[in-house]
Image (cartoon, coloured by chain):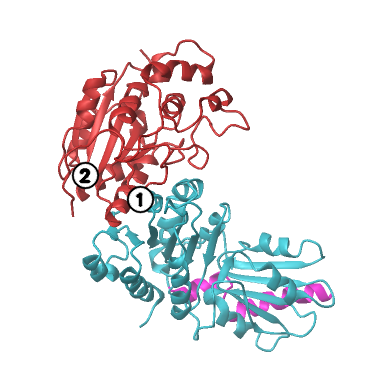
Amino acid sequence: MDTMRKRFASVVSGLLDEDPRLAVVLAEIGTDGFRRAAERHPDRVVNVGIREQLLVGAGGGLALAGMRPVLHTFASFLVERPFEQLKLDFGHQGTGGVLVSAGGSYDWPAGGFTHMAPGDVALLDTLDGWTVHVPGHPDEAETLLRRACAGGPGGADGSGEGGDRVYVRLSAQTNAHPRPVTGEGFLTVRRGGPGAPVVVAVGPLLDAVLAAVRDLDATVLYATTVRPFDAAALRAATAGPGAPEVVLVEPYLAGTSTAAAAEALADIPHRILGLGTARAELRRYGTAAEHLAAHGLDPHSLRERITAFTARAAV
Amino acid sequence: MTIATPPHASGPAPGSEPPPSSGFDSLPALMSLMTGDEKHDAAATSTLDALWVLYDRVLRVRPDRPGDPGRDRFLLSKGHGPMAYYAVLAARGFLPADWLPGFGSYDSPLGHHPDRTLVPGAEIGSGSLGHGLPLAVGTALGLRARKLTGPRVWVLVGDAELDEGSNHEAIDFAGAAGLDRLHTLVIDNSSASHPLPDGIASRFTAAGWSALTVDGRDHEALYAAYTRPHPGRPHAVVARVEPKHA
């Protein structure tokens, strides 16, 4: 079966053949997918072992040397564990790179909380200049990865100055069909009537959102690039009579994008409901479907929570 | 894959003459511009001799070619107490001496920890310990990937800085990968609360590095240690200076 991670390995392996400035850094996780690429490009596919601080620090050094580094491991070990390295070894140095994570918030529920990273996007929100992509389909992942890898290390002398910093959050969860995403802004996939609530569905949760609102009057925006947050699209979608009602449905910590949405609508009265994974640990194993239901992110739960939110406004 | 170490070449890169620079004797006066003190204790200058010999006789870096892909890279990981570093950069013409009196002020590019985006000649911003060595490993990997076999990478760390686990990730990987363009200069002023029982050099040799321990005030000994061949291995020089808490 095609997965985002398999697509990542095949697409970036191909890009390594084309772009001599591209380098992949791994920390044991994901090495199988890059075995052939490592044989072809031993200096540009580097496995540092189980050393995540070095994964990020070495990536930062590659950028300083004028390379475009692509770093990959589980989200918890890419963003949470070496967070200060992300802050200093890229941001403070003024360099760029591509982080590609796997595992997301609940891709491996039987693995438990040690392998879940519901806070990754919220953490990156504390830093400046990170673009965040959350694809909902392997085809979308390919488009977004190609765009991320093409970003230069920056600087006329290849010093890495000012290069793009991009986070691509891959997931085992996907929608049934890809959408024509570009790496910029939100797509309008369903247009409700004037004043209808606007639901922003992020990445793999689009199908669940569309099922939840199938017979409701609602606009649905599809977000695979969540940072920068497409404030213009949200404002345009909410234009109309009455105070805008916005529901954010994100496959990571609930409320992660609430501040960004509030900022987009700061000058008008509005209401926002932020849905996503709960802050409290479930301390359950099982399946992704069970975790989605526990977090209230299955179609039935979403429908109940969205209608309750809009009904309150009608009172 | 390893790259054979070419014969050591010291001094500036070939080409036109570099801008004029001042000598070692100018450094105390330059440091006084930052501190206001006539004399500096050993702790404030623990890096001074080691830095000077590196910049004066080993590193191929020039202030008029800051972005030269073929330049050597010096990464100051131990970013605190950077007065000696700024003084050396000023003496070598990377920054004007009249920046020094503003040290640490709002309008100065010279902070108590250096910022590479503000300080000409600074390859990294540092201050938080344990970042320079991993960045140096990545820089060495990047230069190798770009087929730039000439430039050498040097990183300066403190003995107590080696407490940070990130250094050990970098030391072990660099040894295993045979990154022979990589050099670590450890300034050992015995400031670690829990020193390594077998010493610092043995920590590096255990990971497959070449390593030497020398008197950090002896310029000829430093130069000899800096330039000792180390084919197929990264190289560490432990420069011992007066204990911080003597």
Please name whichever residue, B130 or B111, is drawn nearer the observer in this view of the structure. Answer: B111
Give the residue drawn at x 60%, y 64%.
A228
Q: Is residue B135 above or below residue B199?
A: below
Which quadrant is the C terminus of chain A positioned in? bottom right
Is residue A291 magenta-colored? yes
Horizontal arrangement in the rendering, residue B228 relative to residue B101 (left or right): left
Residue A65 horizontal/vertical position (percent):
37, 51
Q: Magenta residues?
A: A287-315
Q: Is residue B55 above or below residue A292?
A: above
Residue A191 falls in which quadrant of the image?
A: bottom right
Residue A216 horizontal/vertical position (percent):
71, 86
Horizontal arrangement in the rendering, residue A224 relative to residue B143 (left or right): right
Identified by mark 1, the residue type is Ala
Horizontal arrangement in the rendering, residue B105 relative to residue B193 (left or right): right
Q: Which chain is red?
A: B
Is any part of residue B194 visible from this angle?
no
Q: Is residue B37 above or below residue A95?
A: above
- In the rendered structure, find residue A58 and report the number of the disc placed on it: 1
| Residue bearing the label numbered 2 | B180
Pointer 2 indicates a residue of which chain? B
Tell me the SS state at disc 1: helix
